[in-house]
Image: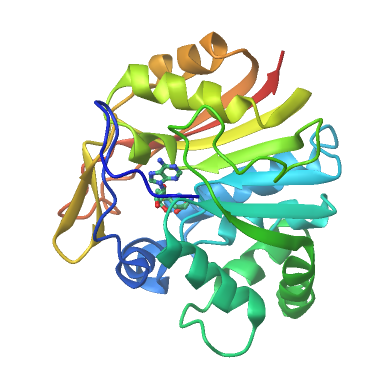
Amino acid sequence: MEERATQEAGETCHEGFDPATYLKNFYSPEEALLDREDSICSWMMARLQRVFNEGDVKGDLLVDIGSGPTLYQVMSACEVFNKVILTDILDVNRNELKLWLQNEGGSKMDWTPFLKKACELEGRSPSEWTEKAARLRQVVTDVLPVDVHRPQPLALHALPPGGADCLLSCFCLEAACTNVASSNRALGHIGGLLRHGGHLLVLGVLEEIYYCAGPGVWIPVVSLDEAQFCDSVKRCGYTLIRHEVYTLPQDIKRENDNLTGVIFVKARKN
Ligand code: SAH
């Protein structure tokens, strides 16, 4: 997919995104705080484990939109779906994912604590993390370019004709968009990749203004509150099944943090 040279109104520019900085800022052990039940990462992992354990979110193919350089989001999903496709607009992120998936020592990111956490949440022994890593590497069949601002975000024929059975997207729409109209448009575009009756699962930040994606790289994001988030999902052709909100505890808030919380949405395409 060719990179678009210019940004339209409402679209962010991700030049300067540095996977290593992003991973360190949000997913290193000292930031992820997986040993604390009330950390953002523990909360997200628990939401994801629960939703993939409920039984109704299932099928052959799950597509994760805007995966960035991260894998935590599909660690429970990989036990339920036969195939998982990861996607991102940036080569650097897709390359980072491929390095981990190839398992030839090229990735500097150690996902072990997250794999152990996912096992624990599933009621398994953390020592089974190696089996989970192997399952993840087997189930992820592709890492593809995507652009949520295109009416057709993936290359033609990237997915089977009916579309995916489930779409997951974590912190991508707000990062790709600077206003609500653009974010709603993007949500509509990715909906085209999902079969009717398929599930949409979204993790999003609430009321954030920017995020740090590289040394000195602060990317503006669309700042939505809980009601706007739910409204967007309903407007874009989905039935909202449930939403849950996480509020950042004061003692976890970092100096440069400007987000108040995180929202998790489970919806079904009409
Ligand atoms: N899902 C990951 C990464 C979120 S960071 C996580 O949970 O941490 C936001 C991601 O959105 C980045 O990887 C960025 O490259 C991607 N992104 C930005 N603009 C995009 C666009 N127009 N289409 C698809 N992805 C985009």
Q: Is residue 153 above or below residue 95?
A: above
**Closer to the camera, 7 or 261?**
7
Q: Is residue 135 above or below residue 246?
A: below
Q: Is residue 128 left or right of residue 86?
A: right
Could you say where residue 83 lies in the image, as x and y percent from the top left? 79, 54
Report the residue at 26% width, 45% height from top: 13
Q: Is residue 150 above or below residue 22?
A: above
Report the residue at 29% width, 33% height from top: 11
Could you say where residue 265 lies in the image, as x and y percent from the top left? 57, 29
Q: Quadrant of residue 237?
A: top right
Report the residue at 29% width, 60% height from top: 17
**Closer to the camera, 221 or 252?**
221
Report the residue at 24% width, 61% height from top: 16
What is the tally of numbered marks visible in this picture?
0
Q: Is residue 179 above or below residue 157?
A: above
Q: Quadrant of the C terminus?
A: top right
**Closer to the camera, 48 or 223?**
223
Q: Is residue 18 left or right of residue 130?
A: left
Any part of residue 46 in sight: yes
Q: Quadrant of residue 236?
A: top right
